[in-house]
């Protein structure tokens, strides 16, 4: 499949997923924080919830599972040697090389994700496939993750893109060992505009890398940056407070993105034939409008601040576009879903779609709702659990 993503809303033609497995059961209460969680998840329930999510996506587009992709590339002995050695060097476990390389491809793929003995830690967060990589236009950005517990995810994805999809990758790790970016902080507005979050996961050096990269690559380019609160932890990424829904609509956490009462910085970086200028904006929506994106903000949680805070905590602003005006998110955020319905989005239950009671193709604008109690407790939503690799072009 050709890699090409130039917006958040183009018709989805390919996406990478990872079904949560026993890796998320390897946490205990005293390791939750180092695993980057705030609670323990029930795997059986999480998998049932995820199955509806995956089935909806499979009815709409081509889906790939990381476990399958990794198993496939590990069948090549040269790739297997390179990948295992890189992982072990990164984690200071080179003494394990001989034993790991003796394991056949499918089992090795499983161990690299689910963990092995007390030697390789599980990849607790890998079902949030958004974070380790981002498809930006026709290339893939391999993120330099803030926390060591997630670095192996980026290594695996780098090999998947190089050896399965035959795609060129680039990374902030080549710019500076202290440059960090994550996929939840990168939204593609159009072919000449990126939206970035600057918070606890994507830092200034990571943003500097992207500015420098695109200043050399694009004669005219814009980057709009939203500074994010460092607490509570639900503000981890930009896509937890802002996501595109259509050409004319977006989902927002209003207190930050619209009113910006606490005065978090919003910066427009303009690139013009190598010249870089910085302009401060009063809020993110004003910055978008000045760039030509006249979007109607739909409030996560509706107009009640109590529900805005409660539903943002459970990824109420984190929607994923299947196409223009065709989105998917959690049903538990009832005030958000009701607000979307009033804005013209038909509400479709994932279970009804999976059981062929209704068809997404019969609706022009819709929100698919996933019944989820466990998945949101992991700290992410539908956009977090998807890594799109191809979308159709959007005529703005």
Image: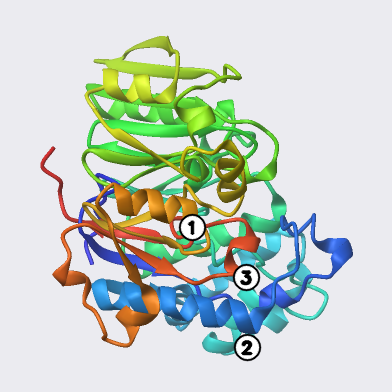
Q: Which residue is mark 1?
A: 334
Q: Picture coordinates of residue 217 (x, y %)?
A: 28, 30
Quadrant assignment, res 60: bottom left
Q: Secondary structure at mark 3?
A: loop
Task: Give the mark nearer the N terminus: 2 vs 3.
Answer: 2
Residue corresponding to mark 3: 374
- Please state which of residues 268 and 180 is positioned toward the viewer in this rendering: 268
Image: 70 above or below 387: below
Q: Residue 190 at what x, y percent from top left? A: 24, 37
Is the residue marked by circle 1 packed among few (<14), some (14-19), or many (20+) residues within 10 Å? some
Q: In the rendered view, would you say 282 is above or below 74?
A: above
Q: Residue at image x 47%, y 64%? A: 331
Distance in Å between CA atoms under marks 3 and 1 = 16 Å
Q: Is residue 361 above or below residue 142?
A: below
Instruction: Name the mark nearer the viewer: 2 or 1.
Output: 1
Which of 280 and 164 lies nearest the eye of the viewer?
A: 280
Helix, strand or loop under label 1: helix
Answer with mark 3 or mark 1, whichever residue precedes in sequence: 1
Q: Quadrant of the C terminus?
A: top left
């Amino acid at each position: 499949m050709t890699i090409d993503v130039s917006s958040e809303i183009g018709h989805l033609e390919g996406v990478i997923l990872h079904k949560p497995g026993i890796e998320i059961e390897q946490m205990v209460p005293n390791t939750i924080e180092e695993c980057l969680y705030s609670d323990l998840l029930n795997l059986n329930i999480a998998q049932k919830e995820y199955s509806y999510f995956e089935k909806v996506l499979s009815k709409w587009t081509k889906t790939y599972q990381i476990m399958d992709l990794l198993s496939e590339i590990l069948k090549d002995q040269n790739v297997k040697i390179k990948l295992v050695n890189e992982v072990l060097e990164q984690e200071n476990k080179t003494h394990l090389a001989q034993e790991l390389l003796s394991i056949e491809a499918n089992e090795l793929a499983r161990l690299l994700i689910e963990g092995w003995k007390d030697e390789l830690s599980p990849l607790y967060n890998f079902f949030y496939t958004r974070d380790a990589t981002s498809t930006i236009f026709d290339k893939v950005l391999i993120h330099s993750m803030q926390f060591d517990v997630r670095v192996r995810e980026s290594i695996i994805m780098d090999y998947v893109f190089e050896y399965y999809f035959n795609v060129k990758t680039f990374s902030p790790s080549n710019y500076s060992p202290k440059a960090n970016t994550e996929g939840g902080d990168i939204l593609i507005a159009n072919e000449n505009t990126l939206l970035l979050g600057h918070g606890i996961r994507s830092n200034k050096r990571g943003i500097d890398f992207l500015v420098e990269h695109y200043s050399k690559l694009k004669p005219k380019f814009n980057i709009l940056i939203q500074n994010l609160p460092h607490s509570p932890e639900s503000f981890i990424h930009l896509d937890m407070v802002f996501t595109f829904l259509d050409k004319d609509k977006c989902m927002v956490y209003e207190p930050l993105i619209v009113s910006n009462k606490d005065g978090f910085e919003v910066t427009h970086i303009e690139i013009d034939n190598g010249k870089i200028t910085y302009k401060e904006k009063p809020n993110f929506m004003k910055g978008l409008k000045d760039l030509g994106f006249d979007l109607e903000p739909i409030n996560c949680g509706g107009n009640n601040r109590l529900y805005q805070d409660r539903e943002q905590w459970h990824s109420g602003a984190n929607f994923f576009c299947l196409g223009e005006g065709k989105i998917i998110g959690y049903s538990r955020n009832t005030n958000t879903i009701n607000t979307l319905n009033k804005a013209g989005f038909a509400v479709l239950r994932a279970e009804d779609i999976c059981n062929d009671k209704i068809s997404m193709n019969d609706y022009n604008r819709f929100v698919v709702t996933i019944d989820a109690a466990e998945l949101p407790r992991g700290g992410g939503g539908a956009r977090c659990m998807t890594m799109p690799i191809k979308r159709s072009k959007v005529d703005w």
